[in-house]
Amino acid sequence: MRETDVIVIGGGTGGYSTALRAAALGLGVVLAERDLVGGTCLHRGCIPSKAMLHAAELVDGIAEARERWGVKATLESVDWAALTATRDDIVGRNHRGVEGHLAHAGVRVVRGTATLTGPRTVRIGSGAEAGSVWTARRGVVLATGSRPRTLPGLEPDGARVVTSDDALFAPGLPGSVLVLGGGAIGVEYASLHRSMGAEVTLVEAAERLLPLEDADVSRYLTRGLKKRGIDVRAGARLEDAVVHEGGVRATLRTARGEVRTLEAERLLVAVGRVPVTDGLGLAAAGLATDARGFVPPADWSRLETAVPGVHVVGDLLPPPSPGLAHASFAEGLLVAETLAGRAPRPVDYAAVPRVTYSAPQTASVGLTEAEARERGHDAEVNSMPLTAVAKGMVHGQGGLVKVVAEKGGGRVLGVHLVGPHVSEMIAESQLVVGWDADTADVAQHVHPHPTLSEAVGEVMLSLAGRGLHQV
């Protein structure tokens, strides 16, 4: 039996951030990963999908150049092989970078499956070190991530019925696609397919897209997607799907009981993700999942389970952890510093930003208007369209800035954005919400002109009673 200070099971964003920080604090670290370090985010999620969405933005830009700016540009074709090669190169360089960081930090990466055989013991079940057993003096960190959720009776076949993983690495795009699920993943893939020329139907069982976001943001997003030609069917549930030679025939039932039948070459199931705990050996460590499959912590300030020395990060955590890569980075830092004997601040989940990289994009942090009122805040809301500032007119894609705050120039409770490039604007608002800043204080900040961020500044000025251009 071998010993080390910390054993991390899973090399995704939560796992490798834990390993790197623990090693930097002088701890011996073993990181067990059965696939590739970097995990879902790097290889099957955040990075490759955003590379594809950037390519989609370039395709959309050609149409805008021609139709709005008089640039006589035409799209001859999309070289799918070249596009995916660029995507894969970006992923590969990032992967090599992560491996290099781990090696430089002195983290021992064990390639193979890892199973708990006790609270602090792990057996390697495959790979070059199969059969070896490790003991952790300080603790074990579970970071095995998640996989796409599937629906009973609608198992993906990789061709006609696909998950986001399948769609990302398909040899080409279909002429038509029905996207089932109007959360961030479904909206992004609907946007991507539409940019590349597919006919897209986007179905969401809830009454609106992005049901966890502010209602006004959802409305603006839906308007933008419809303007692009995406058929949005909110408040509709899938009753049946039949795969045939030409594609998929889906039967939907609306909230009013109406039945609709749709045809598409491909059905993309994007109804969320589920934690990966199979083969992890939770029972041997005295652990169990909750009803949703998560591994809940007993102490959120340390992300430690009911079994001392066993910590959890990333997609294994239930809400309020949002299941986002950047949140798992913060969780990894917290756990590493805890294992090193420090007393780090708990993760402030209320100040974790949320982004959907569609066209238009959405970005938010903090409470929605409805949440603020439900929690008893004496809330004041102010908003303005992005086209109210000059740079918004230049982009010409519409959009919205909405701020929820306590009345009388009080604390900023939430910031909600929809429009072009708002993913790059939300970091300022993360600081505002995370530091409990007042609108009166934030109104003192001078925003560069001309930028989209001026709209955020103007809304803050208005909430502080100093607005100049509110319309």
Image (spheres, grey):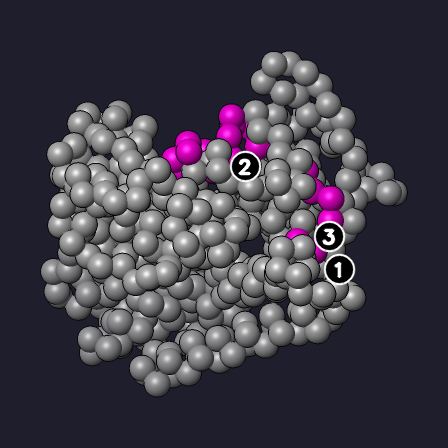
Q: Residue at x 44, y 52 (%)?
A: 392
Secondary structure at badge 3 equals: loop
Which of marks 2 and 3 precedes in the sequence?
A: 3
Residue 351 vs residue 180: left or right?
A: left
> What is the spatial separation of the Cα atoms under label 1 and label 3, in whole angstroms?
12 Å
Q: Residue at x 51, y 70 (%)?
A: 36
Q: Residue at x 37, y 80 (%)?
A: 101
Quarter-wise, where is residue 267 in the image? top right
Residue on which disc 2 sits: 222
Residue on which disc 1 sits: 172
Task: Please tell me which residue lies in front, 400 or 117.
Answer: 400
| Residue 242 higher or lower than 278, as above or below | above
Residue on which disc 3 sits: 197
In this picture, which residue range is highlighted in magenta?
195-216
Q: What x and y, as percent, mark residue 243?
A: 80, 38
Which of marks 3 and 1 precedes in the sequence?
A: 1
| Residue 12 higher or lower than 459, as above or below | below
Q: Residue at x 55, y 74 (%)?
A: 90
Q: Residues within 10 Å of mark 1 (few under 14, many from 20)?
A: few
Q: What x and y, as percent, mark residue 73?
A: 71, 66
Task: Please tell me which residue lies in front, 173 or 124.
Answer: 173
User: Is 395 part of what is drawn in magenta?
Assistant: no
Position of the N terminus by quadrant: bottom left
Q: Residues within 10 Å of mark 2 (few under 14, many from 20)?
A: many
Q: What x and y, as percent, mark residue 184?
A: 50, 45
Amino acid marked by disc 1: Gly
The label number, if any, that marks residue 116 in the structure image: none
Amino acid marked by disc 3: Gly
Q: What x and y, as percent, mark residue 67?
A: 67, 55
Residue 36 vs residue 371: left or right?
A: right
Q: Nearer the viewer, mark 1 or mark 3?
A: 3
